[in-house]
Amino acid sequence: MDRRTLLCGLLALTACGTGSPTRKPGVGSARPGDRVAALADVPVGSGALVDVGGDGQLLLVRPSESEVRAFHPACPHQGTTVNPPAAGVITCPTHRSAFDPASGAVLSGPSPRGLTEVAVAVSGPEVVLS
Ligand code: FES
């Protein structure tokens, strides 16, 4: 078997996989274990919006050196992308709903519910989906 045939076979096996990928709100086509961001790109005491899995986006929040949380960044009120935490609060720029960065819970404003949390973990220098 030549190198090209072997490579094509491996690509075909990868394409078959074990079924359709598990999708979660905000993660696009990313799967558990996939890298979301470099830990260094998420400021301590604040956070960052990151593109994930092609068409997904997450809001990463870093309350301490070793802890990172992730939320679907669409505001539950009308879908505006919320801002990373500033002065200890996540805010929606459209109608000013405010959310707790520790839990995603609504603190004030018209949002009918909190932000949806997505499970992530710190793995060495990276943030990965759990
Ligand atoms: S869209 Fe966020 S508060 Fe209205």
Image (cartoon, rainbow, N blue to C red):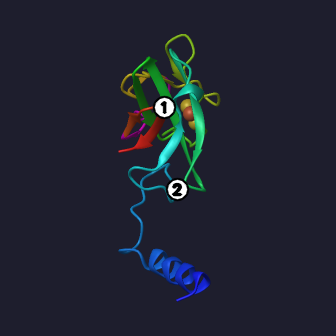
**Residue 56 x %, y %:** 56, 51
Q: Residue 72 lies in magenta, yes or no?
A: no
Image height of 52 relative to 47, above or below: below
Check disc 2 and report the residue beneath it. Answer: 28
Query: Residue at (44%, 22%) from the top-left corner?
Result: 101
Q: Is residue 48 above or below residue 5?
A: above
Seen from the viewer's position, the closer of residues 1 and 11 is 1
| N-term-proximal mark, 2 vs 1 | 2
Q: Mark 1 highlights which residue?
A: 125
Magenta residues (range): 109-119
Q: Position of residue 28 (x, y in %)?
A: 52, 56
The residue type indicated by label 2 comes to Gly
User: Magenta segment, principal secondary structure?
Assistant: loop
Give amino acid for label 1.
Answer: Pro
Choose top left, top right, bottom left or bottom right for residue 123: top left
C-alpha gap between disc 2 and disc 1: 22 Å
Which residue does the image show at 50% across and 48% down from the upper left? 26
Residue shown at the point (59%, 39%) measured from the top left: 50
Is residue 1 shown to the viewer in this render? yes
Mark 1 closeness class: few <14, some 14–19, many ≥20 residues within 10 Å: few
Q: Secondary structure at mark 1?
A: loop
